[in-house]
Image (cartoon, coloured by chain):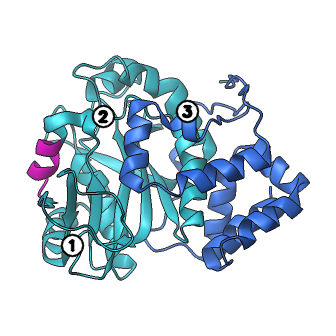
């Protein structure tokens, strides 16, 4: 079994490692993020892709919708230590287990990253007594690949980059090593929506390579 | 912090919740994600939590309940789903168990649906 990464580089000083902790998400976690973080993130420029997300609604909504599709969600919260070594929520994620793998010719299942949010480094430094918020982009993807591998899906993951994130979000996922689903590619059985060119995924080779890169941090 | 969300003014009857879930299930995940980003998801699922307590910003490390990197077992998963539901939905589900049973039955209850069905009997 592969475990989650135990640390990530500081967003302000990549030579510093910030310890990370993981907990399954509850309604209280979602409420805290909406009440304490969401208003601050909505003021960030350039605008964030998650600025309209209301986690207190998304959490029960995601569970209920996926249950009706005979799938389960796995919502997680990432915690990191603040300057007083108390734990603070720094990342939110709702994933779907055993979602159709986005490469239509491969009938396997994958972990689908539905909603992810990471702490804005300036917001968390200035408001939450955290001099070194962790850099979470790679970690949020790694969580999904770990869960996929441990569920027997060989590190296959998929996600859709929200249009609200613009071209910048596409560039982020490309730079993190994900494969871009060509916009002419057919969608897998079970996914009805057309391909808008904003889907990303990993196959077992890519996922395995990305997992190995973070193994020293587990 | 002792602060609470304002109660939602939308009457969250179980029928309304079930109808909203059925309607939302007809969309793909990327479409629902876009609706959330555009702020239009509330038209499809017009419910907000009813007076959820806001926890403190921080907690000591010894209070952390570490998440497993393995798939969850049935009981843990059920408890997690329960902990994600606003209490009002759970109360409604309990109070109107018959309707909820019919809701679950519409989809040929299997493992996933069984978990949804059991929402009515647990806090």
Looking at the rendering, the stretch of residues picked out in magenta corresponds to A170-177
- Percent across and percent down for residue A125 are 32, 24
The colour one sees for chain A in the rendered image is cyan
- Of circles 1 and 2, the one toward us is 1
Which residue is drawn at the image coordinates 24% and 46% (left, top)? A137
Compare residues A44 and B48 and report the one nearer the observer.
B48
User: Which residue is disc 2 drawn over?
Assistant: A49
- Percent across and percent down for residue A21 are 42, 52
- Earlier along the polypeptide chain: callout 1 or callout 2? 2
- Earlier along the polypeptide chain: callout 2 or callout 3? 3
The colour one sees for chain B in the rendered image is blue
Residues marked 2 and 3 touching at CB (< 8 Å): no
Whether residue B59 is visible, yes or no, is: no
Whether residue A210 is visible, yes or no, is: yes
Q: Which chain carries label 3?
A: A
User: Which residue is disc 3 drawn over?
Assistant: A32
Using the image, determine if residue B44 lies above or below residue A217: above
User: Which residue is disc 1 drawn over?
Assistant: A103
- Percent across and percent down for residue B9 are 73, 25
């Amino acid at each position: 079994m592969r475990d989650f990464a135990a640390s990530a580089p500081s967003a302000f000083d990549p030579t510093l490692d910030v310890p990370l902790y993981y907990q399954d998400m509850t309604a209280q976690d979602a409420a805290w993020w909406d009440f304490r973080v969401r208003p601050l993130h909505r003021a960030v420029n350039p605008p964030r892709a998650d600025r309209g997300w209301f986690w207190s609604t998304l959490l029960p909504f995601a569970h209920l919708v996926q249950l009706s599709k005979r799938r389960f969600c796995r919502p997680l919260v990432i915690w990191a230590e603040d300057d007083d070594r108390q734990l603070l929520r720094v990342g939110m994620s709702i994933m779907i287990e055993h979602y159709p793998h986005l490469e239509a010719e491969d009938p396997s299942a994958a972990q689908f990253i539905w909603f992810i949010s990471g702490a804005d480094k300036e917001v968390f430094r200035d408001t939450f007594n955290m001099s070194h918020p962790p850099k979470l982009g790679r970690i949020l993807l790694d969580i999904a690949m770990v869960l996929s591998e441990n569920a027997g899906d060989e590190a296959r993951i998929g996600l859709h980059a929200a249009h609200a994130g613009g071209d910048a979000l596409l560039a982020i996922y490309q730079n993190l090593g994900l494969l871009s689903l060509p916009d002419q590619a057919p969608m897998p059985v079970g996914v009805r929506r057309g391909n808008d060119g904003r889907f990303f995924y990993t196959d077992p080779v890519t996922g395995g390579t990305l997992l190995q890169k973070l193994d020293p941090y587990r | 912090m002792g602060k609470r969300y304002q109660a939602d003014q939308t009457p969250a009857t179980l029928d309304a919740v079930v109808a909203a879930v059925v309607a939302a299930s007809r969309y793909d995940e990327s479409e629902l994600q876009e609706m959330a980003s555009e702020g239009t998801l509330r038209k499809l699922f017009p419910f907000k939590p009813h007076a959820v307590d806001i926890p403190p910003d921080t907690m000591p490390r010894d209070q952390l309940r570490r998440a497993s990197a393995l798939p969850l077992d049935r009981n843990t998963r059920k408890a997690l789903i329960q902990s994600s539901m606003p209490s009002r939905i759970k109360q409604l589900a309990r109070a109107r168990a018959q309707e909820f049973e019919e809701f679950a039955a519409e989809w040929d209850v299997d493992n996933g649906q069984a978990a949804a069905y059991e929402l009515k009997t647990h806090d």
